[in-house]
């Protein structure tokens, strides 16, 4: 098998695992509507992201609106504030990474929509977990593709450029530079799943 086939198998495996985790959370938390909605949403966007390499706005936007409505019904105006601050938190946490070219706009909007449901505290915890998981998955992609040497030399070159020119521009991911892209909705799903099972990271 060549590199592309190994990556396809790996991508399929982690997608299935992420979706299975979300489904298991769905059926083991039937009394918790927030967890139910979140796990269903993440299972759907993980599948879409793996297949189509994008998270459609026609999934993210309706979910964000429903999350706002849900929290409003549950908690009134306090729920509106909760949903709004959660969405802004989700947006703000990933926006710097997006501006550096590290992920797509769909990933940012996906976390913002989840934040509208979960609120600012929970979305911060999920963000921390998904950052760890995303880093591990990214490294595994390079291992599976046999491109760890490329990754190390790429990082070394970028730090040398930063050291010489004192500019963050070298860290902005150029299109197609790494040749590696994985569906980040999966990392969000894993981060959410770990948070549900384990609780706060600190």
Image (spheres, rainbow, N blue to C red):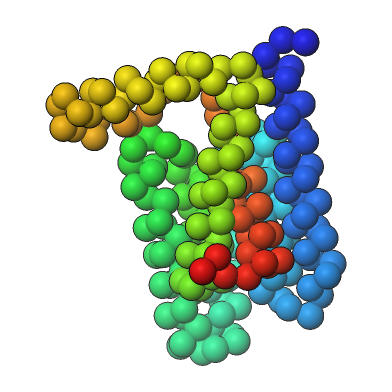
Q: Nearer the viewer, residue 47 or 143?
A: 143
Residue at image position (22%, 29%) is 162
Residue 56, visible in the rendered structure: no
> Residue 168 at x, y = what percent?
24, 35
Q: In the rendered image, which quarter contains the N terminus?
A: top right
Residue at image position (80%, 58%) is 23
Where is residue 88, by image quadrant? bottom left
Image side of residue 117 versus residue 151, left or right? right
Image side of residue 79 versus residue 158, left or right? right
> Residue 66 at x, y = what percent?
59, 69
Q: Nearer the viewer, residue 59 or 35?
A: 35
> Residue 125 at x, y = what percent?
52, 65
Image side of residue 104 versus residue 31, left or right? left
Above or below for 15 versus 124: above
Residue 2, visible in the rendered structure: yes
Where is residue 139, by image quadrant? top right
> Residue 68 at x, y = what percent?
53, 73
Where is residue 49, by image quadrant? top right
Residue at image position (53%, 41%) is 135
Q: Nearer the viewer, residue 169 or 37?
A: 169
């Amino acid at each position: 098998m060549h590199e592309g086939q190994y990556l396809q198998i790996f991508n399929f495996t982690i997608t299935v695992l992420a979706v299975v985790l979300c489904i298991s959370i769905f059926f083991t938390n039937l009394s918790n509507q927030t967890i139910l909605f979140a796990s269903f949403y993440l299972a759907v966007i993980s599948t879409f992201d793996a297949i189509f390499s994008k998270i459609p706005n026609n999934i993210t936007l309706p979910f964000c609106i429903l999350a706002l409505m849900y929290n409003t019904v549950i908690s009134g105006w306090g729920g509106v504030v909760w949903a709004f601050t959660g969405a802004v938190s989700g947006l703000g946490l990933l926006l710097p990474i997006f501006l550096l070219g590290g992920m797509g706009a769909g990933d940012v909007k996906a976390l913002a929509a989840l934040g509208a449901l979960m609120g600012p505290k929970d979305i911060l915890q999920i963000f921390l977990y998904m950052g760890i998981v995303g880093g591990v998955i990214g490294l595994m992609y390079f291992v599976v593709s046999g491109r760890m040497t490329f990754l190390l030399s790429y990082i070394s070159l970028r730090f040398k450029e930063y050291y010489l020119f004192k500019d963050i521009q070298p860290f902005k991911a150029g299109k197609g530079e790494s040749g590696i892209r994985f569906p980040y909705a999966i990392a969000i799903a894993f981060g959410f799943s770990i948070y549900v099972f384990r609780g706060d990271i600190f």
